[in-house]
Image: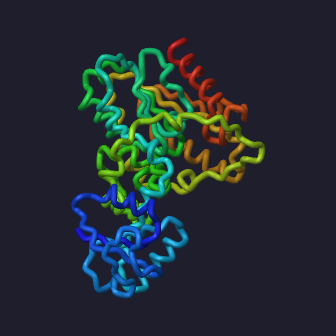
Amino acid sequence: MRVLIYGIANRILRSKFSCFIGEKYEVIGISDKYIQKDFLQGMNYIPYDRISEIDYDYIVLLIETESVRKSAKKELEELGINKEKIVEPYLFFMTNAYFTPDIKGYIDGLSLDKSYENIVMGLSYSFRGIESGRFPGGTVDVSWHSQDLYYNLLLLRELKKSKFQLYKQIENVFMVFPYYYFNYDMSKSAEAYAGGYIYANRGFDDFHNASSMDNDIIIGHLRCRELFGDHFWDNRKWDLHWRGSSDVIKSNDLISLSSTWKKERSQTIKENEELFNQLINEVSGKNIILIIPPFLTNYIQKEDMIFYYKMQELFYESIRNYSITVLDYSNSLTDTELFSDATHLNNNGRDVFTNMIISDIWKK
């Protein structure tokens, strides 16, 4: 496939482009509206006003400043260039990429020589808020920022497929899910792409419902991954860099709940209820513990609490038919010193919360 570079001057982006572009892509030249020659690499220069005459599959914008990049994209569209052929190299702008694990790879690399009696799955509430390494018996922790039900199911199935002897050891399945969980689809969340969170599931090469989304950010990320993803993620390792935070919530940190709390998505709820049913069936015979993490509801804007309680109602309605242990810690902690924001614990809170879970599960 033929690729045209747009943007000449940025040395770092040029270097990243050269390092990460896939083998199946042929670079046919470079163009720029304001510079008439490639002084960096001496590549074939294509005048700006002749771009529309060139046969290419993609134009990659090697422009770092977002406002300038958006302006260039608009100018190219005004030349008659199909916006679907314009690629913004989002991966190159991600500051957290080196700390984004391949969780499937983490599972595949688990040692059969160790003992694992627990598995923890969930989002940042467990990734940041629970020190699962302190659980008795050893723990497989596949929690990750913004992780949804679909990917939890894929990870569980990968564990059973690649490490079945290990899976057989597991006694306790901890599902750390917030009230809005049935209303949430990671593959439809532009924030999950912009933050790089969804790429922790890159080992599956499965972006679930993303292809159905009419969202420029999501579509742009998928195009960028297509061109650069295979090489870009080489040598990225599981890292605990983001496990915790020492921040303490400030007295004026009242928050407004996100749209995931406020907008009821019936199709997503229906799909997630089916996924949850599959997840429960997959772990049949295990001790299933569903944990609702702590929230500092006094720091949620009062007008938003109606949505909080609505999602609480929907959550319990979705799990009503299952005979599983539910530990609701949503209002269990009220000390602001334990929170980094209204919905996430800090390091001190993580220690307290972990102690609570250990006491409730193992010290009855």
Q: Residue at x 72, y 35 (%)?
A: 336
Which corner quadrant of the image does residue 359 belong to? Answer: top right
Q: Measured along the vertical axis of the image, is residue 296 above or below residue 210?
A: above
Q: Left of 36 or right of it: where is 263?
A: right
Above or below: residue 172 compared with residue 320 = above
Quadrant holding the C terminus: top right
**Residue 276: in sight, yes or no?**
no
Q: Residue furthest right?
A: 251
Would you place residue 7 above or below residue 122 in this image? below
> Which residue is at the front of the view, 181 or 213?
213
Q: Which color scheme does this rendered protein use?
A: rainbow
User: Which quadrant would residue 33 be assigned to in this image?
Assistant: bottom left
Tell me where residue 332 appears, x and y as whole percent. Answer: 65, 29
Percent coordinates x, y for residue 232 in the rendering = 35, 51
Residue pictured at 48% horizontal, 57% vertical: 93
Residue 50: x percent and y percent? 34, 86
Query: Can residue 307 be spotted in the picture?
Result: yes
Residue shown at the point (63%, 24%) measured from the top left: 352
Most foreground residue, 329 or 119: 119
